[in-house]
């Protein structure tokens, strides 16, 4: 029997109780793969907040508040090596418990995300720490559904050493692979392009009731103090669309908190509060995954019922496109351009700029309206086009299932 540790940014910090739909969706699909294919294996996961639904063995993530991240990383590494070489623990009780959890497993599986980047150095160095521990204690490492980079010079050198020990690295963006992986000097045999783990087949195939309006979904988040400009841009866009089409707006959040601070619902509600839009707000304060309710599936189901999604969220695109819903990606900067255009290129096999907007472009509003207009005018055809694309993609592209089938767990 193998022991598998799923490593993901899930669970929400205890104080904030946030829920990030994309990370939870990738984690849950990975968990289901192990459950379906190896039901006798012991599966556990690290989580920020331990919930009460023990369908899986949860253990807490390692928490630290020290800054800078690299200082804590180096100090913890020294303590790990002392423990490994001299069997002497200088770790605190919580640190030792965390380390014991990690090294008690045979395989450490990073279930996906875009946080292995110098944009998120605290999480990046936490991942570096786990990768180093896996190397020291000879644990198998798997990475799937990853967007990796960009890195600064120091982080790049560390990534070169630690990422090379992975058995396989599933990359969900061809742009990402072209731009960063030569710098990382990774073995090409380890790299494989794949669809995001949460890019799954359409499940809601019930016929929709006819409407005399278009239902437009918004999945937009704040990024680096962009709120004022984003609010103005989206408000102006909605007003332009309303002059030509009968529409309703539904807010589809991907980052949720129990207190509403810093989440997508709060950000988007403020964005539309000054506009007289006919809106229906899905105020979903979901905290956790459980056996009985998977909020990521609920968000995907809601997304499947709309006619167009306008989103800055990568998993907004994943949920929409996989459910045959046309979408426009809003790119804040190069980081989001790599993520969002990456999934668009993988699905459409063509210029991703046809379905994306650079928000810093001086003509962003005009470009957004033109692309939304085109997708609404040809809505039926665009949905049919995506249905044909997905039928082909699920059989030709690497999915989580096909990637995992190529792995050997015996070495």
Image (spheres, grey):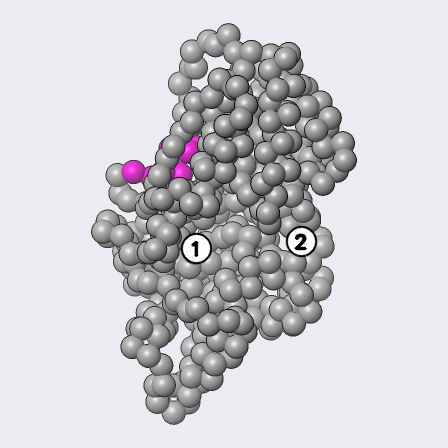
Considering the image in quadrants, where does the C terminus appear?
bottom left
Label 1 environment density (alpha carbons within 10 Å; few <14, some 14–19, many ≥20): many
Q: Residue at x 31, y 62 (%)?
A: 59
Residue 149 percent location from the top left of the image: 63, 58
Residue 296 lies in the magenta-colored region: yes
Residue 352 among magenta residues: no
Q: Residue at x 38, y 67 (%)?
A: 62
What residue does disc 2 label? 177
User: Is 1 situated left or right of 132 in this image?
Assistant: left
Q: What label does residue 9 carry, if any?
A: 1
Q: Spot the residue most to the bottom.
A: 86
Q: Is residue 110 left or right of residue 292?
A: right
Magenta stretch, main secondary structure, is: helix
State the residue at coordinates (70%, 29%): 365
Q: Residues within 10 Å of mark 2 (few under 14, many from 20)?
A: some
Up the image or down, 382 lies above or below 400; here it is above
Q: Is 76 placed left or right of 46 in the picture? A: right
Where is 65 relative to 385, above or below? below
The label nearer to you, 1 versus 2, is 1
């Amino acid at each position: 029997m193998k022991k598998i540790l799923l490593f993901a940014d899930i669970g929400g910090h205890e104080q904030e109780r946030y829920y990030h739909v994309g990370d939870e969706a990738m984690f849950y699909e990975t968990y289901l793969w192990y459950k379906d294919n190896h039901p006798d294996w012991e599966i556990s996961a690290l989580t920020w907040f331990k919930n009460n639904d023990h369908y899986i063995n949860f253990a807490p993530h390692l928490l630290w508040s020290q800054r800078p991240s690299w200082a804590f990383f180096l100090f913890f590494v020294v303590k790990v090596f002392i423990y490994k070489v001299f069997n002497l623990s200088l770790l605190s009780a919580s640190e030792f418990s965390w380390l014991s959890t990690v090294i008690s497993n045979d395989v450490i599986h990073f279930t996906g995300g875009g946080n292995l980047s110098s944009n998120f150095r605290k999480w990046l160095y936490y991942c570096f720490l786990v990768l180093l521990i896996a190397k020291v204690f000879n644990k198998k490492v798997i990475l799937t559904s990853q967007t990796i980079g960009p890195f600064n010079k120091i982080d790049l050198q560390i990534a070169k050493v630690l990422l090379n020990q992975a058995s396989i690295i599933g990359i969900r963006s061809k742009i990402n692979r072209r731009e960063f992986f030569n710098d990382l000097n990774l073995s090409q045999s380890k790299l494989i392009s794949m669809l995001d783990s949460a890019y799954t087949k359409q499940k809601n195939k019930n016929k929709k009731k006819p409407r005399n309006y278009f239902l437009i979904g918004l999945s937009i988040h704040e990024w680096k103090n962009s709120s004022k400009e984003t609010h103005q841009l989206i408000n102006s866009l909605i007003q332009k669309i309303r002059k030509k089409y009968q529409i309703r707006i539904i807010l589809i959040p991907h980052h949720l908190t129990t207190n509403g601070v810093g989440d997508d619902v709060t950000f988007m509600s403020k964005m539309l509060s000054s506009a007289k839009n006919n809106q229906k707000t899905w105020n979903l304060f979901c905290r956790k995954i459980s056996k009985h309710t998977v909020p990521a599936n609920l968000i995907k189901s809601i997304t499947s019922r709309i006619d167009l999604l306008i989103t800055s969220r990568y998993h907004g695109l994943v949920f929409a496109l996989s459910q045959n819903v046309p979408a426009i990606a809003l790119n804040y900067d190069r980081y989001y351009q790599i993520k969002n255009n990456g999934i668009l290129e993988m699905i459409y096999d063509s210029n991703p700029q046809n379905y994306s907007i650079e928000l810093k472009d001086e003509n962003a509003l005009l470009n957004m309206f033109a692309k939304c207009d085109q997708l609404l005018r040809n809505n039926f055809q665009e949905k049919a086009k995506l249905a044909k694309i997905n039928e082909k993609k699920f059989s030709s592209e690497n999915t989580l299932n096909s990637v995992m089938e190529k792995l050997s767990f015996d070495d």
